[in-house]
Image (cartoon, helix red, strand yellow):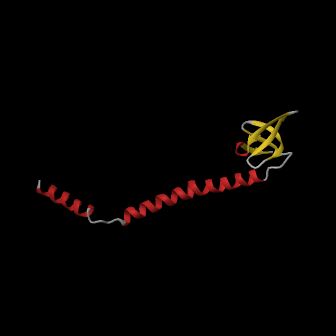
Amino acid sequence: MEETAVVVDNANQVASSGDWTGLLLYCVVVFAIIYLFMVRPNKKRMAEYQKMLDSLQVGNRVLAAGIYGKIKKVNEKTIDLEIAKGVVIEVSKNAVASVE
């Protein structure tokens, strides 16, 4: 019984010694992995998407909100999209999924 008390006492001394370097290193590694595999690729993808939105021109065929159409007019935040002859709808630029 006394041996168990000594082992528990030693474990408490090791745990309370205040060795934060291992924990700090672990946190830094976890945040670095999250940044490398999640944040950085997402920033790159968003930059490419913004470049595509900035390059929209009249006459481009686009997929916006699940609807294919031809751009008739480009506004600051929206585009006028002709989806059929004589049928023009106004769609947010953020709804554009791809340009053909």
What residue is rendered at 70% in x and 54% in y? Answer: 48
Single out the residue that lies furthest toward the front: 76
Q: Quadrant of residue 26?
A: bottom left
In the rendered image, residue 17, in percent from the top left (x then y), is placed at 27, 66
- Viewed as shown, does residue 29 lie left or right of 69? left
In the rendered image, residue 3, in percent from the top left (x then y), is placed at 14, 57
What residue is rendered at 49% in x and 59% in y? Answer: 31
Tell which of 3 and 83 is nearer to you. 83
In the rendered image, residue 40, in percent from the top left (x then y), is placed at 60, 58
Tell which of 37 and 98 is nearer to you. 98
- Viewed as shown, does residue 98 lie left or right of 46? right
- Viewed as shown, does residue 25 lie left or right of 56? left
Q: Quadrant of residue 93?
A: top right
- Viewed as shown, does residue 66 lie left or right of 26? right
In the rendered image, the quadrant that contains the C terminus is top right
Number of numbered discs overlaid on the protein picture: 0
What residue is rendered at 78% in x and 47% in y? Answer: 75
Q: Quadrant of residue 84?
A: top right
Single out the residue that lies furthest toward the left: 2
In the rendered image, residue 98, in percent from the top left (x then y), is placed at 75, 45
Tell which of 15 and 90 is nearer to you. 90
